[in-house]
């Protein structure tokens, strides 16, 4: 509407200017005198202007006739396309102008206008490799997916536009949620243009979603060769894929191949805890306990984790608590100040019924980092030292409402997972899970690991439990009232010696 109004205004101004100019020329005195061959002509200013305009027009016509004459002569001489080229020049000019207008309309967010100009350009140019692409992109912008897919299919017929057609249809299938078809099209597109980074990333994402670990590793290697992925990132992600492949192979019952893949994953990324745990457990099953212990220690030095401690315990599942505590010492000395080392040492001392040592191992974790696992272990220590049910229940009540501690958390969407996975189950992002404290407000896709879950991990089940402290019945683990919790916290805080706190509380409770 605005453009049409502008054209009308410009036309009116042009007519007005021509009229004023002609009136001005008619009012000028004198004129132009032309003398040639004894003939003299005197022209008024208006006649002179009209004569110049006629002369320019005649010159333009003569030039066109000359070009046509040359084309006719060439045609007579045997150039069969001379005449068609002459008449096509004007068509090409109109066609490229329409193509330009269509691209400008597309850039301006006017898809319908772009489609009209694309049709006009096709009429004059007959160059579908140009006009079809413009039509398809305009149809996509207009939301006409059926039209866009139809045009992309036409692009498949030409070698020069086949990649564009395949990629366009692939994006259409992705938008429609047809991931399997999109993956097949991405494989065809990458065969046509191996260096295209966008298609590489799309194919890798679709392969990980489909759990095609072998294909994903090939794509990752291609990205490394083409220079679209740093080498250190490639090593990490290839390790994740190797671990995923090992898990899949193990599920099929191929233990040897699974062990090989898990060891390779651990070699490429020593801090990848699930790879080390899986490789170690496979080694243990094959009687390679020494190799398993060496592998676990190497990974523990990089990243202490409960899964590694559980795998280390599985090396000798039937040993007594004292022997297990002694065997764990070289492992725990690798990272003695790490919270995981201190928690594992406390759990081992609880199993060996050395409760003062367990309290010493926890140190200031109860005050500095009181998550549910720390508080659960502390409740077990206090129970073992003879604290009253009130004190134990207070600790367990705190554990239920305390932070969950480190979990497998997606760095992309902050979703919590109960187990490590190569792909986030919530946002489908690849290699985003890390062992960390979840941000506030994080949600989980499964049961998270809590203190109650972790306590038996290292302690295990001891066959002879006649001397072990009686386990608190589940029915007795009930929340305290606010007053009771405040009393317990005050008594613990006021104790001169932390080891004496349970006895003081029991005495106070008896006096009550």
Image: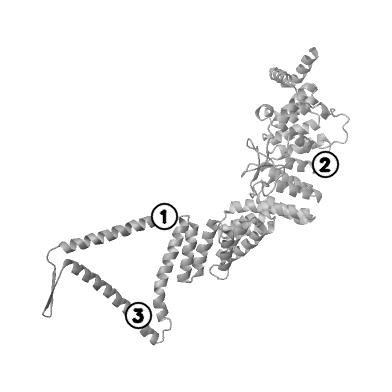
The alpha-carbon separation of the residues under discs 1 and 3 comes to 40 Å
Determine whether the residue tagged by mark 2 lies in a helix, strand or loop. loop
Residue 32 position by quadrant: bottom left
The alpha-carbon separation of the residues under discs 2 and 1 comes to 83 Å
Quadrant the C terminus occupies: top right
Mark 1 against mark 3, which lies toward the viewer?
1
Q: Name the residue rendered at 42%, 71% in the picture.
A: 92
251 to 68, vertically: above or below: above
Mark 2 touches mark 3? (CB < 8 Å): no
Which residue is under mark 3?
68
Determine whether the residue tagged by mark 3 lies in a helix, strand or loop. helix
Determine whether the residue tagged by mark 1 lies in a helix, strand or loop. loop
The alpha-carbon separation of the residues under discs 2 and 3 comes to 99 Å
Q: Earlier in the sequence, mark 2 or mark 3?
A: 3
Which residue is under mark 1?
1
344 to 64, vertically: above or below: above
Rendering coords of residue 476 (x, y %): 82, 26
164 to 434, vertically: above or below: below
């Amino acid at each position: 509407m605005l453009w049409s109004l502008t054209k009308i205004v410009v036309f009116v101004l042009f007519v007005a200017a021509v009229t004023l100019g002609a009136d001005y020329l008619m009012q000028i005195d004198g004129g132009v005198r032309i003398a040639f061959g004894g003939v003299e002509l005197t022209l008024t200013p208006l006649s002179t202007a009209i004569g110049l305009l006629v002369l320019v027009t005649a010159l333009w016509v003569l030039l066109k006739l000359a070009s046509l004459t040359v084309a006719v002569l060439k045609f007579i001489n045997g150039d069969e396309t001379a005449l068609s080229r002459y008449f096509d020049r004007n068509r090409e000019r109109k066609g490229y102008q329409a193509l330009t207008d269509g691209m400008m309309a597309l850039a301006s967010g006017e898809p319908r206008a772009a489609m009209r100009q694309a049709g006009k350009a096709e009429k004059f140019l007959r160059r579908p490799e140009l006009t079809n692409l413009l039509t398809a992109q305009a149809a996509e912008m207009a939301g006409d997916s059926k039209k866009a897919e139809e045009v992309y299919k036409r692009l498949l017929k030409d070698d020069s536009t086949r990649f564009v057609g395949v990629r366009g249809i692939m994006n259409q299938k992705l938008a429609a949620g047809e991931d399997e078809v999109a993956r097949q099209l991405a494989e065809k597109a990458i065969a046509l243009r191996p260096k295209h980074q966008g298609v590489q990333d799309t194919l890798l994402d679709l392969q990980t979603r489909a759990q095609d670990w072998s294909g994903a590793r090939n794509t990752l290697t291609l990205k490394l060769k083409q220079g679209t992925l740093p080498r250190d990132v490639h090593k990490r992600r290839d390790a994740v894929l190797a671990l995923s492949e090992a898990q899949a192979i193990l599920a099929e019952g191929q233990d040897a191949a699974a062990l090989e893949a898990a060891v390779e994953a651990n070699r490429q990324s020593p801090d990848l805890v699930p790879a080390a745990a899986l490789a170690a457990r496979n080694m243990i099953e094959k009687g390679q306990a020494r190799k398993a212990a060496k592998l676990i220690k190497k990974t523990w030095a990089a990243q202490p984790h409960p899964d590694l401690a559980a795998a280390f315990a599985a090396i000798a599942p039937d040993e007594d608590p004292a022997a297990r505590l002694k065997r764990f010492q070289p492992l725990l000395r690798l990272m003695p100040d790490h919270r995981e080392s201190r928690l594992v040492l406390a759990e081992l001392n609880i199993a060996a019924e050395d409760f003062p040592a367990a309290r010493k191992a926890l140190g200031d974790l109860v005050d500095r980092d009181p998550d549910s696992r720390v508080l659960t272990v502390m409740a077990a220590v206090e129970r073992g030292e003879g604290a009253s049910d009130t004190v134990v229940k207070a600790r367990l009540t705190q554990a239920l409402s305390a932070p969950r501690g480190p979990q497998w958390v997606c760095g992309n969407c902050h979703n919590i997972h109960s187990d490590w996975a190569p792909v986030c189950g919530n946002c489908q992002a690849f290699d985003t899970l890390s062992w960390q404290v979840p941000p506030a407000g994080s949600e989980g896709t499964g049961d998270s690991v809590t203190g109650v879950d972790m306590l038996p991990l290292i302690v295990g089940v001891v066959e002879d439990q006649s001397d072990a402290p009686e386990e608190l019945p589940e029915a007795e683990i009930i929340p305290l009232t606010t007053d009771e919790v405040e009393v317990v916290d005050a008594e613990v805080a006021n104790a001169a010696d932390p080891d004496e706190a349970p006895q003081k509380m029991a005495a106070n409770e008896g006096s009550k």
